[in-house]
Amino acid sequence: MPYVWRALIGYAEALGIGKGSCGDVLISLMGIYCVVGMKRLVFRLSYAEGILKGEKKSTIRLRSNYSVGEIVEIYLGSARVGRAIIKRIEKKRLSEIDDQDARIDGFRDRTELLKELNRIYGKKILSKNPEVYIIHFELL
C-alpha cells in the first residue's frame, strides 16, 4: 500500500473513523468518509448506460431519506456497480419540473421524463401534482 494511503488511513483512524467505529472507510480525493449502513440508490437496468457514462446525474423520487454529502451504493437491478455521493437534493412540485431537470436526469425533455414517471408511479399519483425530490449524485 502506498505511503500516502497508509497515512490517510492512519489519519482517519486517529479521528475515530475506521472499522469497528463506523463500518468501512471510504477515502477519495474529495475527503474521508465514514460509511455506516450504507443506503442504496436502485435503478432499472435500462438506465445503466446513462449512469455509467455520467449522463444521468440525478433521479426523481417521491420520497427521500438521503442527505447531502452522504455516500450511497448504486445498484442497477440487483447488481451493485459502485458508490456515489449525494451532491444536492431539491424539493419541487411535479409541475415545476422543467427541461433542464429532465436532461440532468438523462431524458431529452420534460415530456419524455413525465412519460417515464407515469410508467413508474402511475397517473393516479402524479395527477395530484405531488412534491418530488430531485436527488443529484456523482459516481465515485
Image (cartoon, helix red, strand yellow):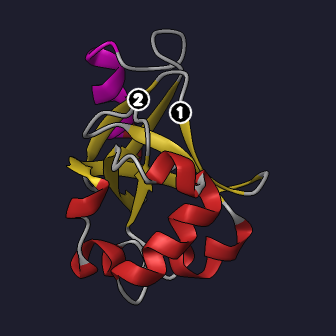
Element type where label 2 sits in the image: loop
The residue at which mark 2 appears reads as: 65
Q: Give the position of the C terminus as an image quadrant.
A: bottom left
Q: Can you give x and y, in whole percent of width and height, for residue 115 in the image?
A: 53, 74
In the rendered structure, which segment of residues is drawn in magenta?
7-16
68 to 105, vertically: above or below = above
In the foreground, 7 or 105: 105
Question: Which residue: 51% across, 46% down?
Answer: 125
Kind of residue indicated by mark 2: Asn
Question: Which residue: 39% across, 46% down?
Answer: 128
Please tell me how crowded label 2 is: few (under 14), some (14-19), or many (20+) other residues with Cα within 10 Å. Answer: few
Q: Can you give x and y, in whole percent of width and height, for residue 45 in the image?
A: 72, 68
Q: Can you give x and y, in whole percent of width and height, for residue 40 in the image?
A: 57, 40
Query: Position of 22 compared to 122: left or right?
Result: left
Kind of residue indicated by mark 1: Lys
Q: Which label's residue is closer to the chain start, 2 or 1?
A: 1
**Residue 2 visible (yes or no):** no
Query: Position of 64 compared to 50: left or right?
Result: left
**Residue 88 visible (yes or no):** yes
Question: Which residue: 26% across, 81% down?
Answer: 99
Query: Position of 106 compared to 50: left or right?
Result: left
The residue at which mark 1 appears reads as: 39
Q: Based on the picture, tell me whether residue 12 belongs to the magenta stretch.
A: yes
In the foreground, 140 or 135: 135
Q: Based on the picture, tell me whether residue 87 belongs to the magenta stretch.
A: no
Image marks 2 and 1: residues in contact by CB distance under 8 Å:
yes
Please tell me how crowded label 1 is: few (under 14), some (14-19), or many (20+) other residues with Cα within 10 Å. Answer: some
